[in-house]
Amino acid sequence: MADGRYEELAVRRDREIGIVTLNAPARRNALSLTMRRELHDALADLDADPAIRAIILTGAGGNFCAGGDLKSMEGITPDQGRARLGEAHQLVRKIAEMSTPIIAAVEGYAYGAGLSIAALCDVVVTDADAQWSCAFGKIGLMPDMGATWILPQRIGVGRARLLAFTGRPIDGRRAVALGLADHLAAGDAAGDAMAIGKEIAATAPLSVAHAKRAFAAPYRSLDEALDAEVDAQAALFGSADFAEGRDAFFAKRRPVFKGR
């Protein structure tokens, strides 16, 4: 089922999977202000739908996202840049903090902000020929859209510095080897992402939501992490999904989770 409310996105639902496609192929899906706002709203809408268990984020025309839309940055002042990034960070926080897991399916270019958005997703699928680059320095900017937070988590501080300082492009195989991406597609990245989404959809959604939130806060101390586990797991012990999962295990049947 397609959603026609958006100018620069294509959004549809395939049973329990939401599929969001960045849809400005003429500019390789460069992230305009309109696309950024629409992406925030589309993700919020899907996250609020209890029938949606996973979201796939991909790009039209053979590219994921070629970075920020430079045409929209002409003549920008420092104060305007501060306001622009403040609004952009609403999208970063939405991706990191929402309950529904997001799977990025990357083909073609994932440059600059495109790399940041892909890396922020919970699972990243790439094809071998995809081109990744933390290319901000090549246009006189520094990494943004959460890149300085997520890249050290994914690939370590040293490698994050190397990619950011040089802007060197890497292909999908190298992205997986570094940990920038998680899964190398055998063929179609979107097809592999859909298969992973269906695996996620078969698990208990409350469990996935709690785990997603826990993984989004990696810099806590051990005691803080253990306290968070206690709070989340105690809530899950009282859920109907845990009772269903336990009963299904002993009955040797497939559980039917309701998100309650």
Image: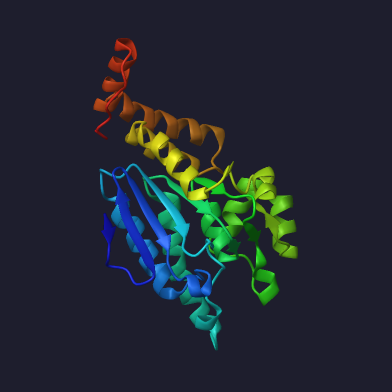
Q: How many marks?
A: 0
> Residue at 31% of width from left, 55% of height from top?
12
Residue 135 left/right relative to 51: right
Residue 139 position within the rendered picture, expressed as x and y whole percent measured from the top left: 66, 76
Picture coordinates of residue 236 (x, y %)?
Answer: 32, 28
Quarter of the image where the C terminus is located = top left
Q: Residue at x 25, y 44 (%)?
A: 50
Specify the farthest residue to the top. Answer: 250
Q: Is the residue 125 above or below the residue 67 in the image? A: above
Q: Residue furthest front?
A: 187
Q: Which of the two residues, 201 or 243, is positioned nearer the viewer here?
A: 201
Colouring used for the render: rainbow
- For the point 36% across and 56% down, the residue is 43
Quadrant of the image occupied by residue 101: top left
Image location of residue 91, percent across then percent down = 43, 62
Point out the image quarter for the N terminus. Answer: bottom left
Residue 130 as seen in the image, left or right of residue 58: right
Q: Is residue 239 visible?
A: no
Q: In the rendered view, would you say 63 is above or below 26?
A: above
Determine whether 219 is above or below 7 in the image: above
Q: Quadrant of residue 163?
A: bottom right
Left or right placement of residue 223 versus residue 209 in this view: right
Q: Residue furthest bottom?
A: 75
Q: Position of residue 238 (x, y in %)?
A: 27, 25
